[in-house]
Image (cartoon, grey):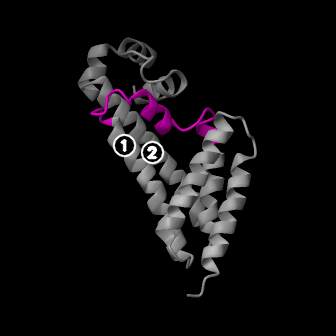
Amino acid sequence: MLDAASQLFYDRGINSVGVDTIASEAGVTKKTLYDQFGSKAALVAAYLTERDQRYRAWVEERIEAEVGANRVLAVFDALNSWMDAHSPTGCPFVHAHGELLGSPEHPAHDVIRAEKAWERELFAELARDAGCREPVALAAQLTSLLEGATVLRSISEVPDAFEESRRAAGALVAARAAWTG
């Protein structure tokens, strides 16, 4: 059920897909779906949570293969390859946020905010480990570059958006790491 819902939500949008469609695609009844998840809102939150867990594992695997400042830049490579494999039309968290703006109490917002906070915290941790000064400020800059690359690649169809953002990130990291304070 979650696999069917995930594909439908990503491909068609959360608000465009009803529970009947999800149940049909999953080969279950609506009752089974509601018994398992309780509501469509809970199913949406489960979809985003599962996707977040898979994405984090993907990123962490690529980071582990690197050392020093290259670990920071590996996040750009990881998201670029993730989009190739799993998110060709952009970030599902941004998509969901846009669709659910009219429902500020929707449980998906907590998942969305947590994913974006994790990204910034990851960059801060990696920058700190690489010896960069002001790692929290650097993390905000790197997150902006990463998110911007996602938008440029998926909406503006700029195929080298990640390469260019990675290059800019490298310059920021080098400038902060060179500081001897």
Q: Is residue 85 left or right of residue 37?
A: right
Q: Can the viewer see residue 82?
A: no
Crowding near pointer 1: few (<14 within 10 Å), some, many (20+)?
Answer: many
Please identify the quarter of the rendering in which residue 64 is found: bottom right
The nearer-to-camera label among 1 and 2 is: 1
| Residue 173 position (above or below residue 74) | below
Residue name at image x 54 percent, y 55 percent: 143
Query: Which element carries disc 2, helix, strand or loop?
Result: helix
Please identify the quarter of the rendering in which residue 48 is found: top left
What numbered label is drawn on residue 111?
1
Nearer to us in this view, 57 or 101: 101
Q: Is residue 161 left or right of residue 180?
A: right
Q: What is the x, y in percent for residue 121?
A: 44, 61
The residue pinned by badge 2 equals 52
In magenta, the rendered stretch is 83-107
Q: What is the x, y in percent for residue 159?
A: 75, 41
Crowding near pointer 2: few (<14 within 10 Å), some, many (20+)?
Answer: many
